[in-house]
Image (cartoon, rainbow, N blue to C red):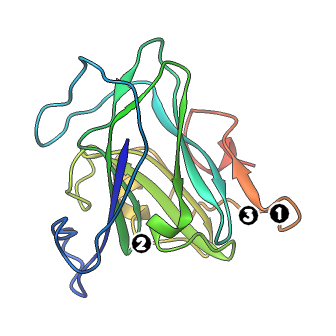
Amino acid sequence: LAVVAAACSDDDDGDAGSEDSDTAVESTTTAPTTTATIPEGGEAITGVSLTEVVFGAEGHVTITNESGAEVTVDGLWLCNRPAYTALTGTIAAGGTLEVPAAELGGLPIEGGEAALYTAEDFDNSEAIIDYVQWGSGGGREAVAVEAGLWVEGGSVEPDPAFGAIERFDIAGGPDGWE
């Protein structure tokens, strides 16, 4: 499983740059092979959702495969604007993928977002498949609202004593998170 992170340009036109840019970071973990693929450019996959955000330098965002089959995440992107991370590999049925905070520009409890995309097209409401915003928020709320994944002005308020937020209802919006 490989994760590649890249920072956006100042104009933030949704082009996260290429993997060979100075801001790219790559880490690799062995993952089982699969025959399932996502066509180039990406397409929506079912059963994959954001389920946890653990804050701080050692934190992470958890992506869970809630389907009954292994899922390939090649072509998916995880966004915490202005950091964008390309995902590759697979998640076993019922398994999880933890993307480290360092690959997402950090995960401060004061505010941020995690947005899961099927393509490197971060202003496109048809490309976003899941979203969560906490505290003072992030920069992709309008895209998530347009896609029907979030409510305008909605934000999860993290409990500093817990240091994380978890999803308990897949229906969408801040009410599904604690």
Task: Classify mark 3: helix, strand or loop.
Answer: loop
Disc ID at residue 92? none
Identify residue type, mark 1. Answer: Asp
Q: Quadrant of residue 38?
A: top left
Sort mark 1 into few (<14), some (14-19) or many (20+) by Cα contacts within 10 Å. few
Q: Is residue 57 left or right of residue 48?
A: right
Total marks shown come to 3
Which residue is the extreme one toward the bottom?
10
- Residue 66 against residue 88 in the figure, above or below: above
Tell me residue 69's x, y (percent).
42, 13
Disc ID at residue 159? 1
Residue bearing the label numbered 3: 157
Sort mark 3 into few (<14), some (14-19) or many (20+) by Cα contacts within 10 Å. some
Identify residue type, mark 3. Answer: Glu
Q: CA distance from mark 3 to mark 1?
A: 7 Å
The residue at 24%/78% (across/down) is 12
Identify residue type, mark 2. Answer: Gly
Q: Mark 2 or mark 1: name the one nearer the start of the chain.
A: 2
Q: Are marks 3 and 1 in contact (CB under 8 Å)?
A: yes
Sort mark 2 into few (<14), some (14-19) or many (20+) by Cα contacts within 10 Å. some
Q: Is residue 82 left or right of residue 155?
A: left
Tell me residue 54's x, y (percent).
68, 57
- Residue 22 against residue 152 in the figure, above or below: below
Disc ID at residue 139? 2
Tell me residue 88's x, y (percent).
30, 42
